[in-house]
Image (cartoon, rainbow, N blue to C red):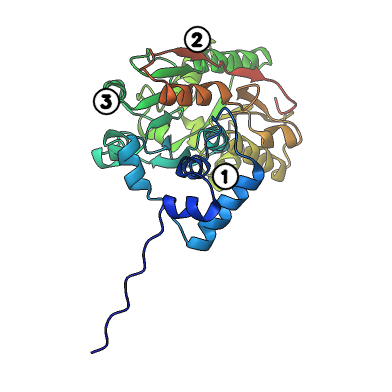
Amino acid sequence: MPDKPPARKVPTQRDVAAAAGVSTATVSYILSGRRDRTTPVTPETRARVLHAVERLGYRLNHSGRALRRRSTELVCVVYRMPDNPWVERLTEQVQQIGADSGYSMIALPLRDRQPDPPALRVLQERYVDGAVVANGTLVEADELARLAAGGLSVVVFHDDLEPDGFDVVDLAQRAALTELVAYLRRRGHSRIGYLAHDVELAAPDDAVQSLKYRSIAEAAAAAGAPLDPRLVVPGADQRDRAYRETQRLLAADNPPTALISASDRGAIDAIWAARDLGRSVPGDLAVAGIGNTSEGSAIRPGLTTVGLPRLDFTVPVTRLYERILAPERLPGRRMTQPWQLIVRESA
């Protein structure tokens, strides 16, 4: 029986350093992606190290390094499915800003209103160093406090939570949505429809998941034009459903004169649905969305919406990495990034 060939030696950082003619510390610095050295390495040195890595077939042992450094160099974005442009922009900035400190990102999409314990293991068992909990994602306050007490850096988008070892981003959604309803009432609209997220209709009393719907319903009732339940329909999560439900509402005997969608994408398809029925926007139907995404400003008529004036999460994302990299635990902070009513031609 022929002898087995000798096992191939797995290359180490020491081997890479010898091949590139640099110290192991320089190899570690370059491969970590950090940018915090007082005297940065030259492009020539970086190229020499990366060439040695490729030639030797070296691969980082992330699990071993995580144990040595007590850091995973991973952060997590927790959000409620389905995805949307708001979350896409948030994840983009988490990746961009984290890259300067050598951090990568993973996503944790949650479908259920009350996440099962296995869904939160990635946070509870510290697979990551930090997490951003996106707007509308239900992770209970006591769970957030436990995660923070266990050493996880957390930034959560929530209008009502108080910081408790984690940071809170207050979007002041309720005030902006109330302003939207007041604006439509001033324009003479007393019959307002609503394209809802599925979860809002499934749990209308849920303090987090139904915040948009409850805020609009309460504002409409206070303004003397309570929402007709027959005009509250699904559609904010799926564009084809938004189109169909809008056409169904407009074909009814007593259609709405204004329609608010819990998402900009639903509102955009509501505009197309009205046009395809020969209805003018805003003449026959005023349409407003929620989110202030770039698509809403590009469509004609431009979409009236509620959201951040600019879809920019630099402040809370930077705070997440400050919290992760701080030598001592930082106190919780409340950051306000208030939504605003943005009036365009659709309403």
- Residue 222: image tag: 2
Badge 2: few (under 14), some or many (20 or more) residues near its Cα, within 10 Å? Answer: few
Q: Which residue is mark 3?
A: 150
* Among numbered discs 2 and 1, the one appearing first in the sequence: 2
Front-most of 156 and 35? 35
At label 3, the amino acid type is Gly
Give the x, y percent position of residue 19.
Answer: 51, 56
Give the x, y percent position of residue 213.
Answer: 47, 24
Is residue 156 visible from the viewing direction of this image? Answer: no
At label 1, the amino acid type is Arg
Question: Does 334 sit above or below residue 304?
Answer: above
Tell whether 177 sits left or right of 293. left
* Among numbered discs 1 and 3, the one appearing first in the sequence: 3
Front-most of 326 and 189? 326
Snapshot quadrant of residue 301: top right
* Among numbered discs 2 and 3, the one appearing first in the sequence: 3
At 55% from the left edge and 38% from the top edge, which residue is drawn? 88
Tell whether 37 sits left or right of 140. right
Snapshot quadrant of residue 250: top right
Is residue 167 visible from the viewing direction of this image? Answer: yes
Question: Does 133 sit above or below residue 117?
Answer: above
Snapshot quadrant of residue 131: top left
Badge 1: few (under 14), some or many (20 or more) residues near its Cα, within 10 Å? Answer: some
Badge 3: few (under 14), some or many (20 or more) residues near its Cα, within 10 Å? Answer: some
Real-space Cα distance between discs 2 and 1?
A: 30 Å
Give the x, y percent position of residue 82.
Answer: 47, 42
